[in-house]
Image: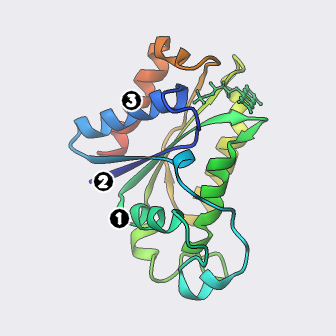
Amino acid sequence: MKVLGILGSPRVGGNSDILLNQALAGAKEMGAKVEKIILSRKKISGCLDCTKCNETGICVIRDDMLEIHQKILKSDAVIHSVPLYFWAMTSQMKAYLDRWCAFFDGSWRWHKAYLPKMKGKRIGLMTVCGDPNVHTADPIVHSFRETCKFSGLKLFPVVQASAAGKGEIERNEKAKKEAYGLGRKIATS
Ligand SMILES: Cc1cc2nc3c(=O)[nH]c(=O)nc-3n(C[C@H](O)[C@H](O)[C@H](O)COP(=O)(O)O)c2cc1C
């Protein structure tokens, strides 16, 4: 069992990172091999909609996303953790998600080369926002939920928390417990 963690915040050691570390610790406790990718430390350009990948399954942009594509394919589960920026996911996470385009054919079905590896892959999502109402980050949930629905990925119950200052979430035992639980569950379900 391999669990890949994707950090969408550029604030390493911040709230989303703390939650992701919790989730990966939970997965590890259940025997999973875990790896974390910090998107802000990678070079990931936006999708060009050139449609070349529809045929080849390979993106023409030669940047760090090519390696991340391979890591996603090899993982049983991918857990994302991302803060809300202006009522949306961060630009790092959006560029990453748009580049999932390479996994699909021209009819938005899994590219035949990837179908066996992608179908039913387990997806985790955790959101953090400064607003005390955790549901202010629901636009991010909507984006992931619809992506999973149309492509047949299994989205696990989303963890949502509020925190503003860097590391403030360290004091939120409930959110940390939920993140840990997500990691445990995704590694065993
Ligand atoms: C550019 C930017 C935009 C933000 N926009 C929002 C927002 O629309 N709503 C909100 O509740 N919090 C917003 N925040 C606050 C962050 O979501 C919050 O500080 C969060 O804890 C950051 O998580 P991190 O420590 O993982 O980076 C914004 C922060 C930044 C830097």
- Kind of residue at badge 2: Lys
Compared to 100, does 17 lie above or below? above
- Kind of residue at badge 3: Gln
Q: Label 2: state its secondary structure.
A: strand
At x 69%, y 21%, the residue is 130
**Residue with the mark numbered 2:** 2
Earlier residue among tags 2 and 3: 2
Q: Quadrant of residue 120?
A: bottom left
Report if the CB atoms under discs 3 and 1 are less than 8 Å apart: no
Percent from the top left, x then y, of residue 125? Answer: 53, 42
Compared to 97, does 151 lie above or below? below
Report if the CB atoms under discs 2 and 1 are less than 8 Å apart: yes
Percent from the top left, x then y, of residue 161? Answer: 58, 24
At x 40%, y 74%, the residue is 116
Q: Quadrant of ligand 1?
A: top right
**Residue with the mark numbered 3:** 22
Q: Label 1: state its secondary structure.
A: helix
